[in-house]
């Protein structure tokens, strides 16, 4: 008689219990929650440790009377109540609004113009795309020094040229006049921000189906109507995203304005971030200083909510999670907050189309009033003139004017770096060195400065930090875009919280944290903090790119026996090279030019980066223009080469990522 098998006690129930528990967890947390949490761990660690924790700590400090690195006594809403009684705060809010609205509007218009012209100019003109990026690549301290040199009332090249051409009778106080300082700062911000709009909008233009233009041309649509009815609708998502991002960044501007004017003259350029700096850092009134930023945070929060809603559209997240997280009271509150802004946007859009349609009707009536034969002849002649003027001469002339505006500061840097001190101070040969000399480079590399040490430190940080941010962003974005788990919607929207406060306010709690860890005045403090600043944008760009990759490729790999991790590294990641390179280039630019954190964190000259080192070269009001110009030229060349080589992949990454991400 065969022995009867009796299951060992608890063997089957244990497996059954584990299987039931696993199913319950999957039902509660999502099908891919284990892998998703693994992929999100680096993002949560960086964002939680260097953004969420400093933000919460700073928020608490705003309710205290803190004058040292240790938190002071709790004072409740006193700091916030006193702010609205402070005339300096109210004035800074008005200056911030003027600066942000005017700068973003001009950047959008100039960016659209530059992108359309670059898209039309083919062949030997295409290399100019790399040149347009120069102002964006330049470190902020170099931008400030360059423009201060150009616009200086006594030694500035612009004033010298205007006086020599008899355009003005005496030098203009561009940065020192109460009525001219803010427009000048807006102009410099425009010069700095055009490349960001241009490269993204150019990517959007390349994504528009060219057959639409061909069909419109066959139907008799003019270039203007093609632009209005094909180009603008095709760029709608890109325009909204880059405008909102630029608004957030411009609203939080600090370093460039601080270096150019310090908020003066007579508070004419004192935006809220500079006021917060003066209260918190210069005056050691950390509570009121952080309260200034926290008071502005709801305004930024509105822009971030709108940005998140647009960037989330068309992206496949965990459906149950997303619907649960964006329904009910939260959705109603967000809709109520953003309603005035949506209404204003729609009103402006309706007004634009009303004016445009009126102009088009007027043109059609004028054409119909002509005799048919004369109408045909007039149309033919007009078409020939339009092709000769708008199709060839006007685009080239307009683009050359734009490139001249973008490259003029660099030309000034080049000619100044090859002049002697006598030529610089006496304005001998303003636009052309005679003779050309390398004395400024000899001084820069001489014993007076540790420029090679600064260059080595900057290169190390600019190489390591983009690798970290790119790896972390690629993992986190994949979890948010491809994996099904509850919480993806929350993380996708909260990842942009990094832009709620200017860096100067995040610096205080981060510096306290690093002091406890004893890593201040080390390169490690920069390597850890830098990737966090660019992580939100990098994550969003990667999310867009992942959304453009067919899911069938992953399904085939999973069927062949690969797990999610193998599928990501062997199948998905190799397909994202353009986006990875775009993210890495953004990271290099940011690490190459960052000034504020390095200025506060690093004290030893042997650990300084180039931006901090250049600031140390300025003693009072004495600026060594020759050495600073030589340093600026050296800094710009390697990054320009890098962008020129990676330009094609960068545009491809933006096209498939940030552009198509919105569906």
Image (cartoon, grey):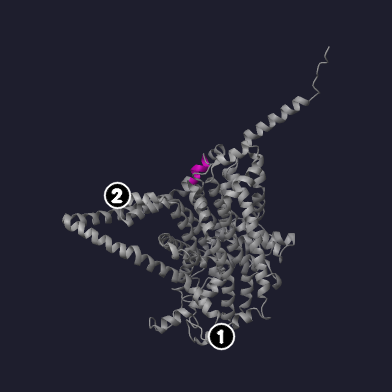
Corner quadrant of residue 10: top right
* Callout 2–callout 1 Cβ contact below 8 Å: no
Q: Label 1 neighbourhood size at 10 Å, few (<14), some (14-19), many (20+)?
A: some
Rendered view: 329 above or below 55 = above
Q: Secondary structure at mark 2?
A: loop
Rendered view: 529 above or below 166 = above
Report if residue 265 is visible in the image. Answer: no
Question: Nearest the camera: 323 or 269?
Answer: 323
* Disc 2 versus disc 1: nearer the observer: 2
Residue 332 within the magenta-colored segment of the rendering: yes
Rendered view: 497 above or below 1 = below
Q: Which residue is mark 1?
A: 420
Q: Earlier in the sequence, mark 2 or mark 1?
A: 2
In the displayed orientation, state which residue is furthest to the top. Answer: 1
Residue 311 within the magenta-colored segment of the rendering: no
Marks 2 and 1, how far apart in space?
A: 62 Å
* Residue in view at x 62 percent, y 67 percent: 281
**The magenta stretch spans which residues?**
328-334
Question: Nearest the camera: 598 or 86?
Answer: 598
């Amino acid at each position: 008689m065969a022995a009867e098998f009796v299951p060992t006690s608890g063997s089957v129930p244990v497996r059954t219990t584990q299987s039931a528990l696993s199913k319950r967890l999957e039902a509660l947390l999502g099908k891919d929650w284990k892998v998703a949490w693994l992929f999100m761990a680096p993002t949560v660690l960086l964002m939680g440790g260097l953004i969420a924790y400093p933000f919460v700590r700073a928020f608490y400090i705003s309710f205290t009377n803190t004058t040292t690195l240790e938190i002071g006594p709790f004072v409740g809403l006193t700091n916030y109540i006193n702010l609205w009684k402070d005339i300096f705060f109210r004035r800074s809010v008005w200056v911030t609004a003027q600066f942000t609205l005017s700068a973003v509007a001009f950047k959008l218009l100039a960016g659209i113009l530059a992108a359309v012209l670059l898209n039309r100019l083919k062949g030997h003109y295409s290399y100019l795309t790399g040149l347009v990026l120069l102002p964006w690549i330049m470190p902020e301290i170099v931008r400030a020094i360059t423009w201060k040199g150009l616009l200086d009332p006594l030694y500035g090249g612009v004033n010298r040229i205007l006086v020599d051409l008899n355009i003005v009778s005496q030098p203009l106080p561009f940065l020192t006049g109460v009525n001219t300082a803010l427009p000048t700062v807006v102009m410099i911000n425009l010069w700095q921000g055009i490349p960001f709009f241009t490269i993204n909008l150019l990517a959007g233009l390349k994504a528009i189906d060219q057959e639409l233009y061909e069909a419109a041309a066959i139907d008799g649509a003019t270039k203007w109507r093609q632009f209005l009815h094909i180009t603008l609708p095709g760029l709608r998502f890109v325009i909204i995203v880059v405008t909102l991002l630029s608004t957030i960044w411009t609203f939080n501007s600090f370093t460039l304005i601080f270096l150019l004017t310090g908020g003066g003259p007579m508070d004419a350029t004192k935006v809220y971030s500079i006021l917060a700096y003066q209260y918190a850092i210069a005056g050691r009134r950390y509570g009121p200083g952080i309260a200034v930023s926290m008071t502005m945070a709801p305004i930024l929060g509105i822009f971030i909510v709108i940005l998140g809603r647009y960037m989330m559209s068309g992206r496949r997240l965990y459906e149950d999670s997303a619907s649960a997280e964006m329904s009910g009271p939260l959705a109603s509150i967000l809709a109520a907050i953003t309603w005035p802004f949506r209404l204003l946007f729609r009103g402006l859009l309706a007004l634009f189309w009303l004016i445009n349609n009126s102009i088009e009707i007027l043109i059609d009536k004028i054409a119909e009033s002509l005799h048919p034969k004369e109408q045909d002849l007039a149309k033919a002649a007009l078409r020939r003139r339009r092709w000769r003027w708008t199709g060839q001469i006007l685009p080239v002339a307009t683009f050359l004017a734009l490139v001249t505006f973008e490259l003029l500061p660099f030309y000034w840097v080049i000619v100044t770096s090859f002049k002697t001190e006598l030529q610089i101070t006496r304005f001998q040969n303003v636009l052309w060195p005679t003779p050309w000399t390398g004395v400024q480079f000899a001084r820069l590399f001489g014993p007076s400065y540790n420029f090679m040490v600064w260059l080595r430190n900057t290169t190390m940080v600019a190489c390591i930090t983009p690798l970290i941010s790119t790896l972390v962003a690629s993992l986190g974005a994949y979890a948010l875009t491809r994996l099904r788990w509850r919480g993806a919607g929350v993380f996708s929207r909260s990842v942009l919280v990094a832009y709620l406060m200017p860096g100067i306010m995040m610096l205080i709690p981060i510096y306290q944290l690093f002091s406890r860890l004893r890593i201040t005045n080390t390169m490690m403090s920069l390597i850890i903090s830098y990737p966090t600043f660019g992580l939100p944008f990098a994550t969003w760009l990667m999310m867009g790119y992942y959304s453009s990759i067919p899911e069938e490729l992953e399904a085939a790999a999973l069927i062949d026996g690969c797990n999610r991790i193998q599928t990501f590294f062997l199948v998905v990641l190799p397909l994202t090279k353009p986006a990875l390179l775009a993210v890495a280039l953004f990271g290099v630019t940011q690490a190459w030019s960052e000034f504020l954190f390095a200025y506060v964190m690093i004290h030893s000259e042997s650990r300084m980066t180039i931006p901090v080192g250049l600031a140390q070269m300025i003693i009072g009001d004495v600026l060594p223009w020759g050495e600073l110009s030589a340093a600026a030229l050296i800094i710009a060349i390697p990054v320009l080469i890098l962008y020129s080589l990676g330009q094609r992949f960068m545009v491809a990454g933006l096209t498939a990522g940030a552009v198509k991400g919105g569906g």
